[in-house]
Amino acid sequence: MKATPTAIPGVVVIEPEVFRDERGALYESYNRQAFLRATGVDADFVQDNHSTSRRGVLRGLHYQLAHPQGKLVRVVRGAVFDVAVDLRRSSATFGRWVGMELTADNRRQLWIPPGFAHGCLALSEADVVYKLTAHYVPQDERCIVWDDAAIGIAWPLSGPPVLSARDRAAVPLAKADLLA
């Protein structure tokens, strides 16, 4: 497993070692000991989620206020542009974002620590699987508008995104409930 830090400390790109032969390929999508050695993070995952999106669907920017979730995100079909936004007011990188393409072919994963908002844009039909360090608490969920100019995410859009009603009603970062 290879771990590469991003421009925001704590957010890490994970690339598993892939074993290939004439039959196909095998890789460990998650191994707690290898993840700890590579990242220094001893995550206790309590929930796995699997979302399916058609091309152009944008989900996010989602986070939980009182029960922040760390997320290990990967794509098992298709491609997405995955984004993490630092919402920790005490952080030197507060309000900054990192984003990258995760695909079934590149097998990259993105570790997003607790205290970040998460969003993704489906670049094709896509299945996204992510491990969470805290359970989903519906009344605790918050959403920041995906195109907030104060954050300035450079989404690779080919047209208007498809949004849920919740994402259309999201607030800008300046009006959001935030973490300490």
Image: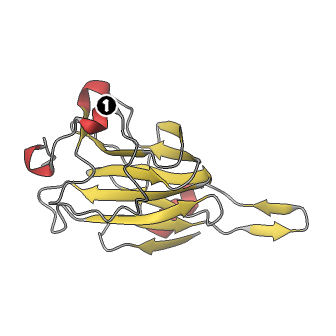
Residue 9 in the image: above or below residue 109: below
Q: Nearer the viewer, residue 52 or 55?
A: 55
> What's the residue at 58%, 60% (across, down)?
103
Q: Is residue 152 left or right of residue 5?
A: left
> What's the residue at 25%, 51% (across, down)?
115
Q: Is residue 52 left or right of residue 136?
A: right
Image quarter of residue 34: bottom right
Residue 138 in the image: above or below residue 63: above
Q: Which residue is mark 1?
A: 165
Residue 179 in the image: above or below residue 17: above
Q: Nearer the viewer, residue 176 or 2?
A: 176
> What's the residue at 45%, 45% (across, down)?
57
Image quarter of residue 153: bottom left
Image quadrant for the N terminus? bottom right
> What's the residue at 43%, 59% (across, down)?
158
Amino acid on which the number 1 mark rests in the picture: Ala
Q: Is residue 44 left or right of residue 119?
A: right
